[in-house]
Image (tube, helix red, strand yellow):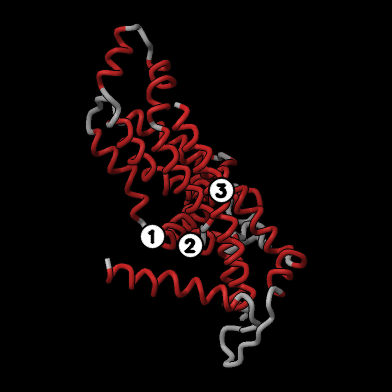
């Protein structure tokens, strides 16, 4: 374990410790002088930074929507693709493929689709849905990010749900069939309770991933229009590297880390408790 522990300390522990230190300074990320300011940066963020609060609220809203949709669609696909279907493995591969693409590349591809592809299709069909300014207004930019994020992540949670479903005892389902249970009853009374551990993992992953969204935010909307779709991660990056205020950016990152840890711990506690009860 020695080499792995050393790499973990160098890559994770030391940068985190340095972030805590720099968050209590006035360093701009370039100057050689580093002045100690204590908790001033944290006070500034909590009392006088409405943009950070707006970005956090946006990230919270989009995380809720993406988490629900990704898990609902991922579970539905897993349920269908555990049935005896033709080319079942091919369908699994197709739905998983978007997750292989990098966020930046995926964002630029969908940027072209939203701005050029949808517009051309809207002109051909006359459907107003495709002629919406998908990246040009606050509401449509929100849903554009949701569409791409769900399209990318649904295949990953699908695989986790498939693994959980295939691990359910066949004897249990056969006993339910003998008792005359229908598909809906088996789904609600057998599969969902037995999949609570998979649900815990999928909720944890989608919540943490979506809260940390940066690459799609950068490549699709760049936080626009007028910072209406700016995520917390993007706000931190701009503060640290565009505004040359590294200390304030690291303070935001520390607060963001604590918030995400708290939210995910609450989610894991609730779903784990549900596992025990079932």
Residue displayed at 51% across by 48% down: 207
Q: Secondary structure at mark 3?
A: helix
Task: Return the disc, 3 or 2, that comes first in the chain's sequence.
Answer: 3
Task: State yes or no: discs 3 and 1 in contact (Cβ < 8 Å).
Answer: no
Q: Which residue corresponds to mark 3?
A: 63
Q: Secondary structure at mark 2?
A: helix
245 vs 275: above or below: below
Residue nearer the viewer, 38 or 77: 38
Marking on residue 45: none
Can you identify the residue that label 2 sits on?
A: 215
Gap between marks 3 and 1 measured at Cα = 19 Å
Image check: 125 left or right of 252? Answer: left
Residue 102 is tagged as 1
Q: Which residue: 25% across, 33% down?
A: 88
In the structure shown, which secondary structural element does the residue marked by tag 1 occupy? loop
Residue 92: percent from the left, percent from the top? 29, 39
Which class describes the residues within 10 Å of circle 1: few (<14), some (14-19), or many (20+)? Answer: few
Residue 104 placement: quadrant: bottom left
x, y percentage for residue 201?
Answer: 42, 43
Q: Quadrant of the N terminus?
A: bottom left
């Amino acid at each position: 374990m020695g080499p792995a522990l050393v790499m973990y300390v160098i890559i994770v522990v030391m940068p985190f410790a340095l972030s805590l230190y720099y968050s209590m300074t006035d360093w701009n990320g370039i100057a050689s002088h580093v002045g100690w300011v204590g908790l001033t940066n944290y006070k500034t963020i909590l009392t006088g930074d409405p943009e950070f609060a707006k970005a956090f609220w946006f990230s919270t809203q989009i995380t809720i929507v993406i988490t629900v949709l990704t898990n609902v669609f991922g579970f539905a696909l897993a349920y269908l693709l555990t049935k005896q279907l033709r080319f079942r493995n091919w369908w699994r591969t197709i739905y998983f493929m978007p997750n292989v693409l990098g966020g930046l590349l995926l964002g630029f591809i969908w940027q072209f689709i939203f701005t050029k592809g949808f517009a051309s299709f809207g002109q051909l069909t006359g459907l107003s849905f495709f002629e919406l300014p998908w990246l040009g207004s606050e509401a449509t930019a929100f849903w554009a990010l949701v569409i791409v994020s769900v399209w990318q992540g649904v295949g990953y949670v699908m695989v986790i749900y498939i693994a959980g479903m295939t691990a359910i005892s066949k004897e249990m389902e056969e006993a339910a069939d003998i008792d005359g249970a229908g598909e809906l009853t088996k789904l609600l009374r057998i599969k969902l309770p037995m999949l609570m551990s998979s649900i815990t993992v999928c909720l944890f992953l989608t919540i943490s991933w979506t809260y940390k969204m940066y690459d799609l935010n950068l490549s699709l909307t760049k936080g626009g229009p007028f910072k209406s779709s700016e995520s917390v991660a993007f706000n931190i990056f701009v503060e640290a590297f565009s505004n040359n205020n590294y200390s304030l950016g690291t303070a935001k990152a520390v607060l963001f880390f604590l918030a995400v840890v708290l939210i995910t711990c609450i989610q894991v506690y609730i779903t784990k408790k549900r596992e025990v009860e079932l």
